[in-house]
Amino acid sequence: MSQPSSPASVASPPTPLGTPPASVPAPLAPAATSNVIGGSSVVHGHSVQARDIHGGIHFHAPAPAAQPHRPVPRQLPPVTARFIGREADRRALDALRAQRPAHAAQVLVVSGLAGVGKTTFAAHWLHEHADSFPDGLLYADLGGRSTLGESGPVSPATVLEAFLVALGASSVPAGTAQRSALWRSTTSQLRLAVLLDSAFTAAQVRPLLLGTPTGLTVVTSRNNLTGLRVDGAFVHRLEGLPTASAVELLAVGGGTRVAREPAAAREVVRLCGRLPLAVALASAQLALRPHRSVSALADSLAHGRGAVDALRVDGEAVMRTALDLSYAVLPDESRALYRRMGLLPADRHDLSLLSALAGDGEGQDEEGDTAEAADIAVGALVESNLLEETGPSTYRFHDLVQPHARRLGEEREDPGPRERTLRRFVDWCLATAASAEGILTPSHRLPGHDLPAGTAPATPLDGPEAALAWLDTHRHGLMGAVRLSARLGWDSSCWRLTDLMWPLFLRLRPSELWIEAHRLGLEAARRSGSRQGEGRMLTSGAIGLRNAGRYPEAAQWYRQALELATADDDVRQQAQALSGLGHVGLLAHRLDEAREHFEHALRLRESIGYRRGAALSRRRLGETALAAGDLATAAEQLRRAGTELDGMGETYEATRVLALLGHVLERGGDVDGGERRLREALARFRSGDARSEHWEARCLEWLGQAAEARGDQEEAIRHYEAARALFRRLSPEDAQRLDDRPRQR
């Protein structure tokens, strides 16, 4: 296209032809030539309007506008200089991280009780992995203060606005849904980690979840946030510190005092529930009072207001405040159950017991309604980490939660409901202990003392192993019920429960509990005027004293029982007392005295047709002959006793006789026959009707002796080590006896 000669001009925007640009003057004379494009035509792109063009024309594109730099937020709370004892938890979170899905965002939930150190742990773990998230580390406290300054959950909309601004968003939409959509778009493909601290509910968290598999969301909460599992979340429950780590934390403030008083230090961390917050506060108290001993601190926590109230920051009982907050957000039914459970002197709670407690005043008319209400109330407590499930339908409080629940129960439960709660607990103990006794030792049942029907729903026990496991799990709660009954003057319940706990004492042999329960039971039976109960407490309690090596006191109790039974013309109880006196003589190696008492007891039992008792007397006579070295007589008595007990279906007693017979035969030279019987007895003692760890240990000891006698040191050591492991827990005296036996090197 030719134009009249004039200086060239360049215009970038589309220009309607025929309209000269403002920068080009109108021609002074008519052009020799002209180009016309009429109508509404528009030329796009660069255009040149000039008269003459000399040389080349170059168009230079404008420099691209600089892209805004995306900020890289680093918002995680700072980590402490000392971070103690979370190696196993770190490995657990690493393992969960390694399971991240390939095409979905990963969510990890760290749950646990207030003060367990969830925030510190999660922040420290994310700091360790910061290099994996070059696009930023975001943090929000979801349980902080609302915009009105009141404590409570922070809205997702507020958190989303802060996150989007932190990532450089120039404007943020008003609605939560729109903010959540923009959040997912903004973070798409970003390698970003988000720590959502102190979440209340899964619904609060969901709008904040990332939409990209390259990111990670870590949530901490006092609740388990079970609803997030639907979104693919993994949950890791944080427990208290290992004892050694908790003691190390205590030493930060306690210094060398902690090393000088290791037992007191362990007691302090136990009273603190091994919670990092509580232990750190105890450590700070030691630092502030450099002349105070660790023992004095332990005594203060044990007998004063307890760790929940005594450990303070700037005058505030922070543990109590934290637990008060967890309690406050519970449903009404869960709060009521929490208070009632706190009143109980128990460390384990079965759902059947909790159903009885939940039914108090809740208006359920049917048993099914009560059980359903209890299950819902318990579920809320478990979800809040105030209650921990330790087995099928079995629960426990954390060590620091128990005193908090007890304080609320004592403060807020009226006297009438409080007494009903305690009465239901004792009745439940009686009912379930009676069920266990009927399964494990039916011959021990005391005639004429059956419990009233409908007193309390017993926990279902499915066979001997379940019955023994229940007694073992609830031994401290049962003992608490005995003490409670003695203190409140429920004398019949006190001695009856002690008597019903017989299979616990017989199979598991907790010596101190055995003796204490029978002392309380004996006093209660005498106060209630029950001579039958008094006799039971004397003979059964004497066995506990005898097993503890307190032979003179055991003999005294047996003699009182004999006098009582003689005055009442109770032949069976006379024989029981005589047998006990014989056993004390046997243990003291007064063999003639022992034999005389056992033979007298045998005659009395045969005179009243008490076949089981007669067989047990023959067993004792066999043991006396063994102690005297008369192995032939011992084997004869034991064979007869075993045959009679087997015929009566007395599996446990027959198995004890089988073990003794095996030992006697091995000592007498019948090594194969003796060891075969010992191994058979060992298998029975390890499971089923004859379950007994004490007799399991005795069989292992005798098998060790047999192996040692035939020169098999390796097998002997294996048996001795297994026996020692059991005896250390059951009977330190027996464990000490094995110290001279060969050991693993």
Image (cartoon, helix red, strand yellow):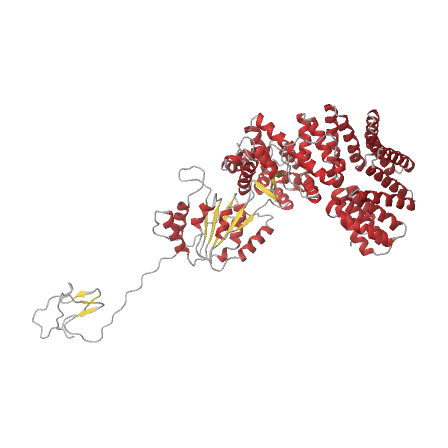
Q: Is residue 114 left or right of residue 540?
A: left
User: x%, y% of residue 552?
Assistant: 84, 32
Tell me, yes or no, if residue 132 can be seen here. Answer: yes
Q: Quadrant of the N terminus?
A: bottom left
Whole-percent x, y for residue 9 in the image: 18, 68
Residue 455 at what x, y percent from top left?
64, 31
Give whichever of 546, 33 is nearer the camera.
546
Tell me if 344 is positioned left or right of 665 in this view. Answer: left
Figure check: 147 above or below 185 = above
- The quadrant holding residue 310 is top right
| Near-viewer residue (139 or 379) | 379
Q: Nearer the viewer, residue 29 or 737?
A: 737
Q: Look at the image and tell me in which quarter the C terminus lies.
A: bottom right
Q: Is residue 58 above or below residue 692?
A: below
Asked if 602 appears above or below 32 in the picture, the reply is above
Q: Please say if 549 is above or below 686.
A: above
Res 8 visible: no
**Does 196 sit left or right of 356 as displayed?**
left
Along the viewing direction, whichever of 46 and 215 lies nearer the viewer: 215
Image location of residue 503, percent across then percent down: 74, 38
